[in-house]
Amino acid sequence: MAIVEKEEASGELEIGEAVTSEEKPLGAFTRPRGGNGWKDWLFTVDHKKIGIMYGAAGLLFFVIGGIYALFVRLQLARPANTILSAETYNQVFTMHGVVMIFLAAIPLAAAFANYLLPLQIGARDVAFPRLNAFSFWAFLGGGLFLLSSMFIGGWWENAPDGGWFAYAPNTGVIFSPSKGLDFFAIGLQITGIASLVGAINLIVTVLNMRSPGMTLMKMPVLSWMLFIVQLLLLFAMPVISVALFLLTFDRLFDANFYNVAEGADPLLWQHLFWIFGHPEVYILVLPSFGVISEIIPTFSRKPIFGYPFMVFSGITIGFLGWGVWAHHMFTSGIGPVAVAAFSVSTMFIAVPTGVKILNWLATMWGGRIRFSTPMLYATAVIAMFTIGGLSGVTHALAAADTQQTDTYYIVAHFHYVIFGGIILGFFGGFHFWWPKMFGYFLSEKQGKLGFWVMVLGFNITFGPQHILGLQGMSRRIQTYSQGQGFDLWNLVSTIGSFLIALATLMFVINILTSWRAFKAGKTPAPGPDPWDARSLEWMTASPVPEHNFDEVIQVERQDEFWHRKWGKNEKGEVVRRATAEEVAHDGSNTNVHLPAPSYWPLIAASGLPIIGYGLVYSLWLCIVGGLLILGGLYGWVFEPVDDPNAEGDHHDHDGDKTNLTLDEGSDATNEEVAID
Amino acid sequence: MRRWPLTETSVTESHQEHAEHPETTLGVSNDKLGMWVFLGSDCLLFGGLISTYMLYKDRIGPTDLGAEEMFDIPFTSVSSFVLLMSSLTIVLAITALRRNDIRRSRIWILSTAILGAIFVGGQVYEFTVFYREGLGYTTNLFGTSFFTLTGFHGVHVTVGIIFLMSMYIQSMRGKLTSAQEERLEIIGLYWHFVDVVWIVIFTIVYLFPQ
């Protein structure tokens, strides 16, 4: 049997790789095996490892983007400051925006999606595990490509300088002759491929991989929000792709899509960008809404209030999100009818958001609330997002918006939404799921202290920017002169930004010291269910074993795990039926087949940034990158999902080899083995 | 051992029996659903490109030839017909493969690829004719957006031809039997989509100006 498998594999491979070997059926390399330290991470297809890598990369980019922000704030701390030149300032605030949106917020959401979505719906993995790995490596490659623009061709010579929105024609070759926007357009194209592939993967996962009984309307709210986000990504990404393709063709091949001198429409980019860009806002915020929709019921010890309303308000936000893009363009001259229509639709979208806020409050109402760190963050999200949402409604009024456009009031608004609504929610999520992901608690004491520094710092930074904006301070200006009344609040804002940096540092320190304390035996192991939580990811060991669940979970109700722990006695009182340890799987089942690790996703994804450099510098490199992608894809397609030569499919336990004997004994082909 | 819907490529003999006892929640294989979802996304790609073309189709210089003068409708109609016929041949290839008629399926796969290649060849010919008549990529916005839109479609057809030729080689090696029918079916979905997009492009780009 084993020999047959080898022949098949090598025979197939010839087409793609022209490499045949009896011993090494998958090309020049033997296939990667699990459990080899760094290799285990590099070639993994495990959704949990990929999720953690997304999280680590997202946090790293968050820190980098934060450093840019600190430089912006330092430059603005005093009037007529000269820390950054005007050119560098443009580049730094552009990089801040691009890195924070595309390389920090999206991947952090992807971290939660990858790690939690399969667990919450009771699946073993995502639908396409290798595609998942490809998504991550493509994202990382695109991100590093984008960041490399800082160094290549001189320090801060070639970084993009057109803002994260990169309004053409301002970003055409005429107005921005450096290579910065080439890096921008191609880098975002690559991360866009990553997002699109990831979205396809997770949509199929949600539709097709739910455990028996897990109907759509029994899925946790987080799963729902992540599902909606993937649908938004699916349809928004190709639009920005088109916009970026046209920009790339303009800049590299002298096309004139955005060249107004040749008769192009100056608003084309704005429309294409914001048709993507506004759904993007909800792509960013819905995951955080989902995260706090998990945290709040758990720490209020009540089911989520109005579950169907939570789901359908999310769907409504997803739909309406497509009909509001032109509120970013009220002052661009799109005409009174369009302005009125988009003004109204923008006010409408506040309604489902308000529904969510009221439902969170109603969930807390009458609950026995524990203010642990995750819950503190979740409540802060409600408060801060409400402030950001309300200032957002003031933009919906076109007359008021005309005054506010391009002032610091806008900056204050979207930082309240993005930082207050998204980043705080993700930090809450980190504290909440940390014991599940890594098997140890983050220190509550440090966590709470960090929370207060973070929230205070955040409000000190962005609160005053409302005032600055209403006083008339323009955004994107490199400096201002004395005596305009901007001095005090700018200084306060700068001080606040360093408090945020401090809070981020405290979070990193918390990770390290809590790990040390756990290793030294000073803190208890969290067990499967440290918070008395409700959804399925808590129904398995912490950290989650590679195969997720020991057996298929038959789902009967929403909050299945909670209902297995708790029930009603004859008097109608809620009583504990079983402890979490009794209900949860201990991860001891080794008789589970998992997809084997693979080189190909990494190889195929590594071709993308090489093509990127090729487009910017020398088309020859494109051939190299193209061959890498083509070879990677062929190797991928002809590689069986499961490794016929694997010693055991389950890498984290060695004891039980029953499945191995079964494989060799059966007449199954490779592929069939993989599904068994 | 429990069966889990974990494969990326459901290419087994047991696939037929899977179809009877669906393992996935929706009963559709992950691969096929993934292709459908991707095609949904691709609609928006062409949507963006077609919108751009619609915006720019009349933006030509005072002496430039416009769409009406430039297009050779009979020629493009024939090449469109060729492409649409390839949708028929791929269906014939899939049904032949389903009957495990390997030889016929191979013939139809090859003819689909050839029909696709004829279409792409026609496009290349058409582009050269336009270029000789004075419509370069950067001549005016009509040219830029026309070449970009039809070029993107041409790349899609070319990718489809690569898929088909890979299938053909697989078939020659005896690796494409009725058990792998779904692979071909998924490529068929993609191929049909590319054809449908061409119907839209042909109507909007070529027929509307007439």
Image: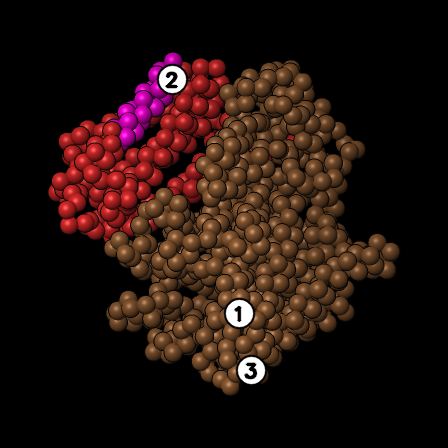
Question: What is the chief secondary structure element of the magenta stretch?
Answer: helix
Q: Work out whether residue B6 or residue A269 is closer to the camera in this orientation and state it.
A: A269
* Disc 3 to disc 2: CB gap under 8 Å: no
**Mark toward the viewer: 3 or 1:** 3
Q: Is residue B111 found inside the magenta-colored segment of the image?
A: yes
- Quadrant of the snapshot with the C terminus of chain A: top right
State the CA–CA distance, disc 2 to disc 1: 59 Å
Q: Name the residue under label 1.
A: A415
Q: Which amino acid does label 3 sit on?
A: Asp
Is residue B114 depicted above or below A538 in this figure? above
Mark 2, chain letter?
B
Q: Name the residue under label 2.
A: B106
Q: Is residue B114 found inside the magenta-colored segment of the image?
A: yes
Q: Residue shown at 53%/37% (left/top)? A: A607
Dot 2 falls on a residue whose secondary structure is: helix
| Residue A194 drawn at (x, y percent) | 51, 45
**Mark toward the viewer: 3 or 2:** 3
Q: Mark 3 points at which residue?
A: A487
Mark 1, chain letter?
A
- Residue A595 horizontal side relative to residue B150, left or right: right
Q: Residue shown at 61%/23% (left/top)? A: A27
Q: Which amino acid does label 2 sit on?
A: Arg
Q: What stretch is highlighted in magenta?
A: B103-124
| Residue B53 drawn at (x, y percent) | 26, 48
For residue A126, say whether it is visible. no
- Residue B49 horizontal side relative to residue B25, left or right: left
Q: Residue shown at 82%/57% (left/top)? A: A516
Dot 3 falls on a residue whose secondary structure is: helix
